[in-house]
Image: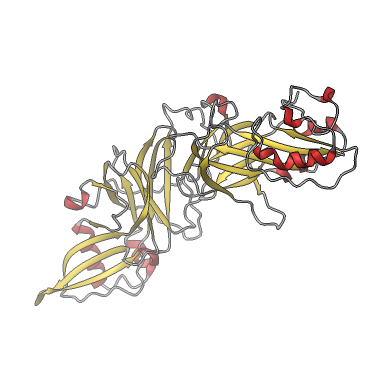
Amino acid sequence: MPMWTKRPLRGAASDEMRPACPAYLGTGWRWAVGLLLALAATACDPVGNITVGVPATSTGSNAYYVDTFTVRLATVWHDSVATSSGDNLLVGRYHDPRLGTIMARSYVRVGLGTAYAPDADEVFDSLVLVLKPDAYRYGDTTQLQSLEVHRLRDPLVDAKTYYTFSQLGYDATVLNQGPSARPFKAQPSRRTLRLRLADALGQELLTTGKAGRLTTEAELYDRLAGLVLTPAATDNASLIRSQVSTEGGGLVIYTHLPYDPLTVISRGFDLSTGAKHFYQVTVDRTGTLLAPLTASLQALDVARTAQESYIDGVLGLQTKVEIPYLNDLRSFGSLVSIVQASLTLEVVPGSSTRYLAPPTALTPYLSGRGNQQGLPIANSSGLTVSIPYQYGVSKLTGLDTGSYEFAITDYCQAVVNHTLDNNGVLLVSSAASSPERVVLGGPKRNENRLKLALYFLNH
């Protein structure tokens, strides 16, 4: 049976299914319309900042407000998140108490550009990998962490798409030694990382260049397939992001001529010229409420996760919303018009910080029966709907909190009209390949719970 409260805004008191507030009692349609427009301000049952436009209707029409629909919420895992089509590299390791231990490593190729033909007399000095992180951090920037560089063995394939689950073989030897291997704190102000790499690799590139065998990109990739950036195995700090297109990032070899040792000669092998990269992201959920989530497209109901649902772009975590009894609105009559339906999802207090920030927006997709991600939900102009993150006073607790408000009217009407299967909606981070994450309250939380408010007309 549907779980709702029937509150006719016009009609006999015998139609009521529970006692109503005195403000709901009245006799005229005009009065009822005015009440619908003022519901957001009524003290006996606040429904939020919902503006309702009521269409013209006949004298015999009935208008209803429903706020106790059964809504089901679950976390769904999609494991196919592509990371080779953007500009970013991601590296680091952080233990998220809710999501588990997250580890990111990046695979990147350096490019040649023009042929490398050093003078036969040049003497090798050093080889340095320069990275240009942006200000983004995910995790705990107060902890020390390390960044290790390895030599890639398996080549990157230009035409291939790589995902968070992809991996390639690389040498176990750490190329950066000495001062460049020291742990550091990844404060957002740290915008350049210079990592001195093993002299043997630099000498190898110099010798190959002198022999005339670094004239094409293919020759460079045969010699150096790429580099792999990894965190230390015991790090518990933050994930760092950088872009391959940022000027100044890449591999730099420094040399000099024996008769002029004070004049530095440098040659860069840019990351952007390499034009192929991806990052791998793994998570160990052991000891978390999400530990039972072991298969792609599996859904974990909020009843099993302390009435919390999770969204994280790069981890492929999505929130599924289902309203199972929508079709039972037809028990009110054969012609049901949904004036407005609004879904409010509040962020669980204490679950977000500056470096565990929620997505700036969510994108709703239609869900398949097996939790497959279908088409994005579009507005009346045909544009994909975006649900922005908001921060303000909660209508449930009266405290400042984050939230997302989703106008789900069109979906509900299509289900009632039988033009759409009621398989639910998947809420996905608009930053699909980044680790922004949010923890949302379920429908049975005492505070910060999910709320659906629905207005409809029965013609």
Q: Horizontally, is 325 left or right of 243 in the view?
A: right
Q: Where is residue 65 in the image (x, y as percent from the top left)?
A: 74, 34
For residue 215, say whether it is visible: yes
How many numbered marks, from 0 up? 0
Q: Position of residue 231 (x, y in %)?
A: 31, 45
Q: Where is residue 75 in the image (x, y as percent from the top left)?
A: 56, 34
Q: Which of 67 and 41 is in front in this view?
A: 41
Quadrant occupied by the C terminus: top right
Q: Nearer the viewer, residue 416 or 10?
A: 10
Quadrant housing residue 36: top right
Can you say whether 300 is above or below 223 in the image? Answer: above
Q: Horizontally, is 71 left or right of 266 in the view?
A: right
Identify the residue at horizontal 72%, vertical 37% (top origin): 454
Q: Horizontally, is 119 left or right of 404 in the view?
A: left
Q: Which colour scheme is used?
A: secondary structure
Quadrant occupied by the N terminus: top right
For residue 368, say whether it is visible: no
Quadrant housing residue 197: bottom left
Identify the residue at horizontal 22%, vertical 45% (top origin): 183
Q: Where is residue 68 in the image (x, y as percent from the top left)?
A: 69, 29
Q: Horizontally, is 144 left or right of 133 in the view?
A: left
Identify the residue at horizontal 38%, vertical 41% (top origin): 103
Q: Nearer the viewer, residue 41 or 425?
A: 41
Quadrant housing residue 126: bottom left
